[in-house]
Amino acid sequence: MKALQEKIHEVGRVLSADVLKVDSFLNHQIDPQLMKEVGEEFANRYANEVITKVLTIESSGIAPATFLGLTIGAPVVFARKKQSLTLTDNVYTSEVYSFTKQESNKISVSRDFLTADDNVIIIDDFLANGEAVKGLVDIVNQSGAHLVGVGIVIEKGFQQGGKLLRDQGLRIESLARIKSLENGKVEFFEDGEF
Ligand code: G4P
Ligand code: NA
Ligand code: NA
């Protein structure tokens, strides 16, 4: 997606050979116009599918997921990372391991908002090692819903998550696929390049 790649070139900051900071439009401040276009792009890529629910994880997945939900007219559910007072036993849960933080966290989604009747798309801001998406896929499987595919705003193609999930037969659509962050420079894969 051209507008997204341009934005990353313009304001993204390469913190190291594997971390890209995009706080100014995705992870802290949000650019609503760009997120609207991101939502529309996900909708276009999955235009041939019936989607009844958009599933993401708090916090940074919520903005892109919500604009997709708005575009296709489907509700958006976000998995919670913290145990909620009012969300206790009626939940699906999964463990998500973070290589960055070297800790495992429980995520949960209420059974009220995901059922076997749903056709689900999973949305997230970043795809690195794929642990968050794996946890969300686990929750979709527990619910008996049908998983249509995954939409990612920024995939770090030099990490293993994308390959791992595609090898399982999942459809993954990433709007920007980073080939390398070496030498402080962002290099993208072109469409169709792997
Ligand atoms: P994984 O799910 O693909 O295995 O990712 P990992 O554990 O490595 O990532 C942990 C957190 O760091 C996630 O956010 C993920 O989105 C984010 N992340 C991973 N790589 C990058 C990167 O290069 N740049 C930025 N900006 N973020 C990255 P989170 O902790 O769940 O936080 P949030 O959703 O509340 O923002
Ligand atoms: Na995220
Ligand atoms: Na994030």
Image (cartoon, rainbow, N blue to C red):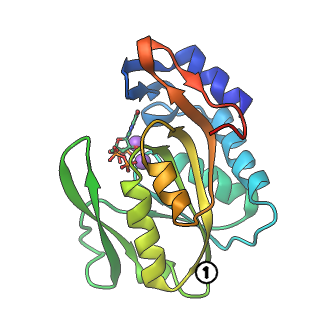
Q: Amino acid at mark 1?
A: Asp
- The residue lying at 50 percent from left, 35 percent from top is 26
**Residue 108: x, y in percent?**
34, 70
Horizontal side of residue 62 vs 81, given as left or right = right
Q: Nearer the viewer, residue 7 or 19?
A: 19
**Residue ID at (43%, 26%):** 20
Total marks shown come to 1
Residue that label 1 marks: 118
166 left or right of 90 in image: right
The picture quadrant where one finds residue 79 is bottom left
Instruction: Give how far across and how far down residue 178 sits, in percent.
Output: 54, 31
Quadrant, the N terminus? top right
Residue drawn at point x = 67 percent, y = 42 percent: 38
Q: Position of residue 11 (x, y in %)?
A: 53, 17
Quarter of the rendered structure image containing ligand 1:
top left
Q: Quick check: 137 above or below 166?
A: below
What element does badge 1 sit on?
loop
Residue 158 position in % (x across, y down): 46, 36
14 or 78: which is nearer to us?
14
| Extreme residue in the top direction | 183
Q: Image quarter for residue 43? A: bottom right
How packed mark 1 is, by other alpha carbons closer than 10 Å (few <14, some 14-19, many 20 or more), is: many
Q: Is residue 41 above or below residue 33?
A: below
Q: Image quadrant for the C terminus? A: top right
Instruction: Using residue 150 as the reference point, say whether residue 52 is left or right of it.
Output: right
Q: Eyeballing the image, is 11 above or below 115?
A: above
Residue 138 lies left or right of residue 9; in this view the side is left
| CB of mark 1 near ligand 2 (< 8 Å) | no
What residue is rendered at 57% in x and 42% in y? 153
